[in-house]
Amino acid sequence: MDRRKFIFNTSLAAASIPLLSAFIKANEATSPISQNLTLPKALKKGDNIGVIAPGGAIFNNSSIEKCKIKLDAVGLNIIAGKTLSTQHGYLSDTDENRAKEIMEMFTNPKIKGILAMRGGSGCARVLPFLDYDVIKQNCKPFIGMSDITALLTAFYTKAEMTSFHGPVGYSTWTDFTKKYFRETLFDKKETEMLAPDHSDFYTISKGLAQGELIGGNLTVFSQLVGTPYLPDMRGKLLFMEDINEEPYRVDRMLMQLKLAGILSKVNGVIIGEFRKCDPEEPEKSLSLKQVLQDHLSNLNIPVFYGAKFGHIKDKWTLPIGIKAEMNANIGSLKLLEPAVI
């Protein structure tokens, strides 16, 4: 049966079916950040996009030309940052130089948005070198994923602005990816997203919930616990994904979130596809699905697996801090407000 047939207006359903209200969890409290959240201006055709490497080094020069083609397909022009052609070990440059370039991209009025060429490693190292007041004053779309999670989270917490978990320059910009990129960043739409029928979608805990979106790569996000860059997680919709992590490591990271009280505060959990996370020795390991069930099935909040973001070809573009509604019964996520002005 096509689960799309079960999509309905949740507010009307809640009113007409009293029992359903037990499964709908709304935002418990409006956070100070949400009240002061700054939204960037919408992108438009012909805008210049600064492309940088705020984490790992770029070892393939042809990727810059490929990125130009990808951005041209959505009507944007590339302005290549210096870090696309520098190297400092596995990093693209020193912490200070990478932070300096981020600041230059925000303050340059000719650049209307910023795209990370890749994640890699090292983004958390630049966080202490950024001026978050200046970033907020020059708010513009900042887009990336994987290790870029550190920057997206810090921009929300310290600069009180929306940034976007979406494709990087290295990504495969499929028609699916471009559709949600445009809808979220160009069209000011309250986009509705649904995990395709051919995906690995499954429900861990049924229900609907509303809250502000926060999350990204699980490894990077969990490492921000205990730092000043992780926001108050009360009432949030937490989304997470990862790649190349054994189930025991996913177990460890989820346990970190649980012991820190984060999983007991959020209104719902949206899990992307965990790629290449099968155990090398299955007979000696829990499966990934077992680990997720152990940590997330008894939280009394909606949880589903198979959302389209992260290290996969087809991606949604998810705005950090924007209020959304998830439906774990069908694997859907709907933005309840535009993410750009």
Image: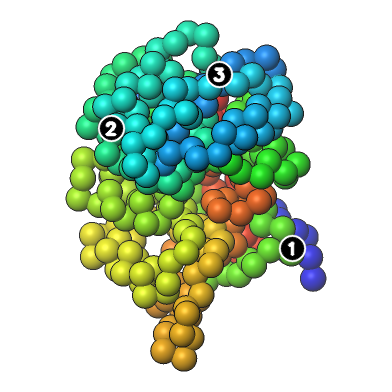
In front of the other: 256 or 194: 256
| Residue type for callout 3 | Ile
From the viewer's perspective, tell me whether residue 298 is left or right of residue 132: right
User: How is the rendered protein coloured?
Assistant: rainbow
Of residues 235 and 127, the one nearer the viewer is: 127
Residue 59 sits above or below residue 138 on the image:
below
Residue type, mark 2 in image: Asp
Q: Earlier in the sequence, mark 2 or mark 1?
A: 2
**Amino acid marked by disc 1:** Asp
Q: Is residue 245 above or below residue 132?
A: below
Q: Nearer the viewer, residue 322 or 57?
A: 57
Name which of mark 2 and mark 3 comes first in the sequence: 3
Is 64 left, or right, of 217 in this rendering? right
As drawn, the label of residue 197 is 1
Secondary structure at numbered mark 1: loop
Badge 3 element: strand
Which quadrant of the rendered structure holds the N terminus?
bottom right
Find numbered disc 2 in the image and state the secondary structure of the residue it sits on. helix
At x 35%, y 51%, the residue is: 221
Q: Residues within 10 Å of mark 3 (few under 14, many from 20)?
A: some
Q: Label 1: how many residues lie within 10 Å, few (<14), some (14-19) or many (20+)? A: few
Q: Which residue is mark 2?
A: 95
Residue 79's tag is: 3
The C terminus, quarter of image: top right
Q: CA distance from mark 2 to mark 1?
A: 43 Å
